[in-house]
Amino acid sequence: MTEQPTSTDVLVVGAGPAGSAAAAWAAQAGLDVVLADKASFPRDKACGDGLTPRAIAELDRLGLTGWLDAHPTNRGLRACGFGQELYLPWPGGSLPGNGSAVPRTELDATLRTGALGRGAVGIEDARAVDVVRDGDRVTGVVFSRSAGAAKETFTIGWRRLVVADGARSQLGRLLGRRWHQSTAYGVAARAYIKSGRSDDDWITSHLELRDGTDQLLSGYGWVFPLGGGEVNLGVGTLATERRPADVNLQQLVGVYTDLRREDWDLQGELRSVRSAVLPMGGAVSSVAGANWALIGDAAGCVNPLNGEGIDYGLETGRLVAELFAAGAGFGTGTGRSRADLVQAWPATLREHYGQAFSIARRLATLLTVPGVLRYGGPVGMRSSRLMTVALRVMGNLVLPEDHDLVARLWRGAGRLSLRADERVPFSS
């Protein structure tokens, strides 16, 4: 076992987009940071690989614009279904007017390398298995790692902890995290396949997703061009505790592939088929303690209307690092930056995402009701103007500095929805 630090200012568990962003920003602020992950990089993760304009903006902040220039650029969404095909450019505004798509093996490795380049210390093949407590504070994480045929454990003490270990968040559960399934959550599967259209400059979503028996599902299928002769192809559907998703994802991916094979010039067989279950819209509680915080997928920061999580991972990594730099969780600071993160971090998440997540998960839950998509889908797809608005709000491409009519209406609907929630996003 290689030598590793035994203590640090900030310990980040999970080196996906959220964890690597948090480590990069915290290290840049002058804090000692350890970035640990259970895997060895590069590693894969079930994901659509799509980068919305929100994600592009965060990658720009991290100085990765030049790296991204070597990857495909897409102009917006080609929406298909119910006998229609619409081309919907990214709305732009205060966000970039382009998107992209990068396989997670490359994206995550690049972000992690960037964090290490800013001073974070990386540890691989280290699974968090327990925590060390000192009264109401958690002061250390116990890791397990293979050493030949044996298992070895070691502990890293820290003053602040960032939990970014993904949707299932095993470390989050040890700290008391709970996922509430009464609002919409997602089940999805993706694969890679060779395509003669891998350089297409539009990402494509099929909003009329049907299974092998021709039953309409409350979800969509996608084809995201990656360049280099390959595309990311996948399917996702919504579910709730009341209406669980009764679908065979592996079979559904196969059905969808057969439907798309001719128009996308798909060649050969699918590879790397992987699936995931995603808590969405902040539908988790206990996202923070006195000196620890959950971010990204671990905190349920996934868009309920399109399943996007990379952008929120990058954003929450930056936001938590900004709180740390202001003294939160460290014993200094006042007001929102006070020492205890129990209130400060959920309040920060609600400030940035509460309204949008509340109305989005309400709409997503509505889509799981039988008949809503069957009758509403054809109506919506008849109007390019309506679907352009839908693309913007479904992708949550509305920022506080946007003051146009759509932005004001979206925020107003979010405020009303938030007041009506029985369990607000990121509740304690």
Image: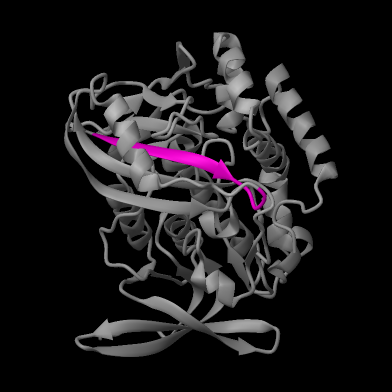
Toward the front, the furthest residue is 213
| Residue ID at (57%, 53%) | 279
Q: Nearer the viewer, residue 146 or 67?
A: 146
Whether residue 65 is visible here, answered yes or no, is no
Residue 73: image x %, image y %? Answer: 33, 27
Residue 226: image x %, image y %? Answer: 27, 34
Q: Quadrant of the C terminus?
A: bottom right
Q: Nearer the viewer, residue 265 or 99?
A: 265
| Residue ID at (54%, 10%) | 384
| Residue ID at (38%, 65%) | 119
Q: Which residues are magenta?
A: 231-242
Is the residue 273 above or below the residue 214 in the image? below
Q: Name which quarter of the figure residue 127 lies in.
A: bottom left
Total numbered labels? 0
Q: Is residue 238 magenta?
A: yes
Q: Is residue 423 magenta?
A: no
Q: Name which quarter of the figure residue 192 lies in.
A: top left
Which color mode does the image show?
one colour
| Residue ID at (75%, 35%) | 414
- Name the magenta segment's main secondary structure: strand
Q: Is residue 93 left or right of residue 328?
A: left
Is the residue 246 above or below the residue 88 in the image? below
Q: Quadrant of the N terminus?
A: bottom left
Toward the left, the furthest residue is 268
Residue 341: image x %, image y %? Answer: 69, 67
Whether residue 285 is visible here, answered yes or no, is yes
Q: Is residue 81 left or right of residue 421?
A: left
